[in-house]
């Protein structure tokens, strides 16, 4: 056999040293094992080694606009709690009329959830003849809560504007559509404790957020006449050096006077004023350069302003 075609029974170390590339065949299995170990480790720790992390976002509650409707408040008179456990035929008939007027557009005249507005609602209106799927429950107290608060995320609005007796009459009419849980003294007591039906209900007036903001701004805005009076007092102040500080370091004189006029009665306001000027001069109506003044000069400036507005 040709010498070149002979198989070597043993590894020729001398030949390996002369040609190191021949060692690749020996160490190749070790590389395979190493790559597998590294790959398994990487996959198991994927969340920690390679995924981007999105910082949490916190919603500023001040940026959330809640629609508040204008509503005139009033006093709803106390009721006789006996109408809850012993409704009269007239009460139930009144409830039927109120149901048709206020509820039938969604729930249908017979309370089967098939009113003309029902197809547009998701979830669909309640079928009062069925016992399953009630959000707040079928007990008298639970239905009253639904009329009082509504059901968020559905077409069921709150009917707290209806007189208490009208709401009770509607509930009693609904209860004629199927077999509902009974009403005992405990149920009535809990309802009265929660809503104080036997004492009468005072409902506050509501205005929109925009109207409230306008009123607050109006209450905290000084008239031009008052401002001119304050400015004249400042200019005629006995310590003209302090007057010069005011004219030199104030960027918005109206804001400075308005804030002081609003807050000067706050306890320990002098320290609050000085801290506010140093930490946020622009928001307080001052120039940023006022932060270079000593506390002694800031104190004199405060004393002058407080004499003017008080």
Image (tube, rainbow, N blue to C red):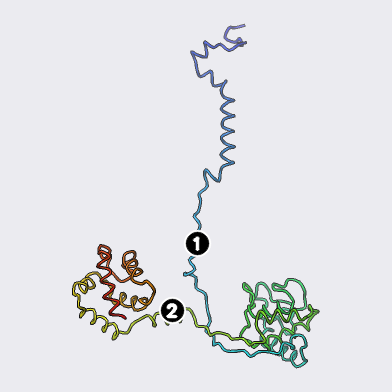
Q: Residue at x 76, y 71 (%)?
A: 132
Count of numbered labels shown in the rendering: 2
Graded by Cα atoms within 10 Å as few (under 14), some (14 to 19) or many (20 or more), the crowding at tag 2 reads: few
Q: Is residue 263 left or right of residue 50?
A: left
Q: Which residue lies furthest to the left in this view?
A: 240
277 over 119 or under it: above or below: above
First-in-chain label (2 vs 1): 1
Residue hosting label 2 = 213
Quadrant location of the N terminus in the rendered image: top right
Q: Residue 156 at what x, y percent from top left?
A: 64, 77
Q: Nearer the viewer, residue 216 or 63?
A: 216
Q: Residue 278 at what x, y percent from top left?
A: 31, 64
Q: Nearer the viewer, residue 19 or 247?
A: 247
Q: Residue 47 at what x, y percent from top left?
A: 55, 46
- Where disc 1 sits, the SS reads loop
Q: In this view, does 32 lie to the left or right of 97?
A: left
Quadrant location of the C terminus in the rendered image: bottom left
Q: How far apart are marks 2 and 1 (CA)?
A: 24 Å
- Where disc 2 sits, the SS reads helix
Q: Give the numbered dot on residue 195.
A: none
Q: Is residue 219 left or right of residue 20?
A: left
Q: Which residue is drawn at 67% across and 83% down?
A: 105
Q: Give the numbered dot on residue 58.
A: 1
Q: Residue 283 at what x, y percent from top left?
A: 34, 69
Q: Which residue lies furthest to the bottom in this view?
A: 90
């Amino acid at each position: 056999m040709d010498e070149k075609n002979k198989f070597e029974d043993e590894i020729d170390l001398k030949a390996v040293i002369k040609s190191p590339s021949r060692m690749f065949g020996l160490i190749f299995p070790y590389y395979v094992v190493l790559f597998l170990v590294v790959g398994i480790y990487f996959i198991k720790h994927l969340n920690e080694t390679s995924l981007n992390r999105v910082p949490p976002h916190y919603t500023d509650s001040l940026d959330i606009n809640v629609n508040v409707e204008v509503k005139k408040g009033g006093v709803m008179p106390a009721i006789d709690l006996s109408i809850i456990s012993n409704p009269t035929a007239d009460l139930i008939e009144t409830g039927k009329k109120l149901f048709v007027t206020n509820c039938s557009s969604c729930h249908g005249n017979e309370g089967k959830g098939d009113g003309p507005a029902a197809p547009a609602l998701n979830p669909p209106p309640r079928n009062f003849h069925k016992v399953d799927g009630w959000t707040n429950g079928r007990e008298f107290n639970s239905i009253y809560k639904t009329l009082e608060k509504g059901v968020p995320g559905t077409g069921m609005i709150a009917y707290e504007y209806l007189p208490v007796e009208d709401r009770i009459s509607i509930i009693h009419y609904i209860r004629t559509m199927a077999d509902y849980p009974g009403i005992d003294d405990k149920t009535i007591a809990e309802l009265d404790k929660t809503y104080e039906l036997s004492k009468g209900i005072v409902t506050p007036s509501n205005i929109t957020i925009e109207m409230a903001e306008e009123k607050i701004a109006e209450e905290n805005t000084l008239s031009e006449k008052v401002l001119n009076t304050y400015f004249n007092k400042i200019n005629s102040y006995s310590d003209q050096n302090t007057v010069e500080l005011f004219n030199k370091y104030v960027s918005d004189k109206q804001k400075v006077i308005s804030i002081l006029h609003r807050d000067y009665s706050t306890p320990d306001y002098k320290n609050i004023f000085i801290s506010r000027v140093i930490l946020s001069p622009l928001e307080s109506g001052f120039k940023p350069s006022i932060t270079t003044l000593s506390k002694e000069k800031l104190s004199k400036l405060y004393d002058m302003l407080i004499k003017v507005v008080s």
